[in-house]
Image: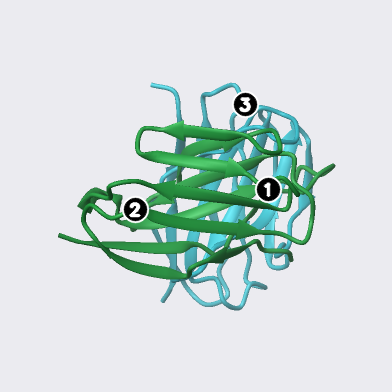
Amino acid sequence: GQQLNQSPQSMFIQEGEDVSMNCTSSSIFNTWLWYKQEPGEGPVLLIALYKAGELTSNGRLTAQFGITRKDSFLNISASIPSDVGIYFCAGPPSGTYKYIFGTGTRLKVLA
Amino acid sequence: DGGITQSPKYLFRKEGQNVTLSCEQNLNHDAMYWYRQDPGQGLRLIYYSQIVNDFQKGDIAEGYSVSREKKESFPLTVTSAQKNPTAFYLCASSDRGSGEKLFFGSGTQLSVL
């Protein structure tokens, strides 16, 4: 089955640094969802995007819906230790109800 | 409190045994989903249902079965045909439609004895 490609796979950063990650697909998406997962828990929704070019913020998090509708980006500004976790992009390819997920970006923050 | 409840949190299966994972939601959502997550991996779709009494196979449905007799419930059975069942199982729900937000339960860790 299809999975979305996320990069980087993992990253170690210093507290206070900004973080960027992206998600790409071979299919067109009408919705992009970004989630954070902590060990042993279910993913928690961070941001939802609905239009090409849309830029949406949630506190220190900003996500963008790519113009081609085949990619999306998530930025975290001024990272803090509690940002540690796995970040997933997700969405249903256009015309489907099958929500597929990215491979995940594992973030570790060094204090 | 509105939400999605998965039970149990930990489950052990003996060889050749069927086990059922529970998922209940009180969000009044029409659609429900089951995903499997292996260590260090992303989520893979097992089954999904857009409405009561209807469900579709996802990408890895072999060895699993589901039912959707009630709007609030979507139990997943891991059958003996699933030869590698050890994984973290996640249930989600959403309003019906393509592009709605998915909300997740806290997961069930299934292990084989």
Q: Can the viewer see residue A83?
A: yes
Q: In front of the other: label 1 or label 3?
A: 1
Q: How crowded is mark 1: few (under 14 residues within 10 Å), some or many (20 or more)?
A: many
Mark 3 neighbour density, 10 Å: few (under 14) some (14–19) many (20 or more): some
x and y percent of residue A11 in the render?
Answer: 37, 68
Q: Do the dots labelled 2 and 1 sit on one chain?
A: yes
Residue marked by disc 2: A18
Q: Give the quadrant of the C terminus of chain B.
A: bottom left
Of A63 and B112, nearer the camera is A63
- Helix or strand or loop: what does disc 3 sit on? loop
Seen from the viewer's position, the closer of residues B8 and A105 is: A105
Any idea which chain is the green one in this picture? A
Whether discs 1 and 3 lie on one chain: the answer is no
Would residue B99 appear left or right of B37 to someone viewing this image? right
The alpha-carbon separation of the residues under discs 1 and 3 comes to 15 Å
In the rendered image, which quarter contains the N terminus of chain B? top left
Disc 1 designates what residue?
A99
Q: Say which residue label 3 marks.
A: B29
Residue B58 relative to residue B11: left or right: right
Number of the front mark, 2 or 1:
2
Count how many numbered circles sit on residues in the image: 3
> What shade does chain B have?
cyan
The residue tagged with tag 2: helix, strand or loop? loop
Vertical position of residue A68 compared to residue B52: above or below: below
Q: Earlier in the sequence, mark 2 or mark 1?
A: 2
* Relative depth, front residue between A87 and A71: A71
Expressed as whole percent of the image width and height from the top left, the position of residue A25 reads: 71, 59
CA gap between label 2 and label 1 equals 29 Å
Query: Is B70 left, or right, of B21 in this rendering?
Result: right
Residue at (73% x, 53% y) in the render: A70
- Amino acid type, callout 3: His
| 10 Å crowding of disc 2: few (<14), some (14-19), many (20+) | some
